[in-house]
Structure formats: structure tokens, C-alpha cells
Image: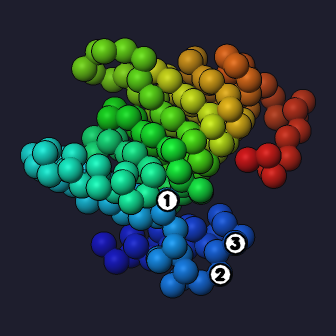
Amino acid sequence: MMRGFREDIETVRRRDPAARSSVEIVLAYSGLHAIWAHRLAHFLWCHGSRVSARVLSQLARFFTGVEIHPGARIGRRFFIDHGMGVVIGETAKIGDDVTLYHGVTLGGISLNRGRRHPELGDRVTVGAGAKILGNIKIGADSKVGANAVVVRSAPKNSIVVGFPGHGCFDRELVRIEESLY
């Protein structure tokens, strides 16, 4: 468990050039606090304490501005930068090394009790304000541009931009600066 905490702190340090020290990261990074609260809430959810899990996730939402349903499955080295307004639904699945910026929604568009939220592959980056909606998949190593609204799946190595989100699937043809994310 402590290894996971250290890995989370190192993830913030690697992905945020403004992170100055481990103490600052632990005390001042609301995205990290939301992730830690989610891990505990998810444990409770998976072990039958669903009301406790929901209460914990609501407390985390109040303190961090990040809403993560305790049923969401999140991989390792997950990073939420400037997390205010991030929403992650119950059946969302997030791979390893994923980065979300503020205002991102991984939401459902169905009343179906089954899978209704997106799945993000490993190493996906989602820009500020993007909305990824429904039971769709964003493939590994993809980028979703700021304020995109995505309602269709995208293969690995995609760049998805616009409203509705459309893909530029050949990274050799499209060059987008990392600074846009």
C-alpha cells in the first residue's frame, strides 16, 4: 500500500512541472487526494460496503471538487491535474498512466444498469473540458483535445478533437504540441 502512495506522489512529480516537493504534493494536490479517496471507496464498494463507499466519495467530492463513483475502475499512475469539475461514472474503466485535466467528464448516456461509461486505454491524455460519453473505448496512447465531445470509440494512437469529436488517426500527418494538453 505504501508503495502505491509513493508511486502516486512520483506520478505527480513527473507530470506536473509545478510540483516542488513531496510535502507540497501530499498537502496541496486535490487530484491526488481524490484518487486516494477513490481507492479506499472502491475497496469498500468491492467488499459490499456500498453506502460507506458512496458517502466517502461524496466527502471527497466536497473537499476536492472531483467526483469519482466508487464503482469506477482506475489503473496505476493515474493523474488528475487541476481536478475541479472532473466527473468519472460508475462503470468507467481507466488504464495505467492516464492523465485527465480539469472539467473532464467520463459520463453515461444510457439508463442501462450495465456498462454505460467510457473505457480509456493505457497512456491516454484527456484535455480540459472534454466530455467522453457512453459505452465507448478510447484506445491506448490516444489524446483527446480540450473541450472535445466524444461519443464514438477511437482506435489506439488517435487524436480526437472537436464537437462532435472526430479523429485524426495518423500522428505522422497531424502534429499537435504537448502544451495543448
Q: Quarter-wise, where is residue 2 in the image?
A: bottom left
The disc placed on residue 157 is none
Q: Residue 60's x, y, as percent?
A: 34, 56
Secondary-structure class at tag 1: helix
The three-letter code of the residue at mark 2 reads Arg
Res. 16 visible in picture: yes
Q: Residue at x 41, y 64 (%)?
A: 33
The answer to the question of whether label 2 and label 3 lie on touching residues, with beta carbons closer than 8 A, is yes
Q: Residue 165's x, y, as percent?
A: 68, 21
The three-letter code of the residue at mark 1 reads Gly
The disc placed on residue 18 is 3
Q: In the rendered image of this protein, does residue 16 appear above or below residue 132?
A: below
- Which residue is tagged 2? 20
Q: CA distance from mark 2 to mark 1?
A: 16 Å
The three-letter code of the residue at mark 3 reads Ala
Say which quadrant the N terminus sits in. Answer: bottom left
The answer to the question of whether label 2 and label 1 lie on touching residues, with beta carbons closer than 8 A, is no
Q: Residue 112's x, y, as percent?
A: 29, 15
Q: Residue at x 20, y 50 (%)?
A: 55
Secondary-structure class at tag 3: loop
The disc placed on residue 31 is 1
Q: Residue at x 85, y 47 (%)?
A: 177
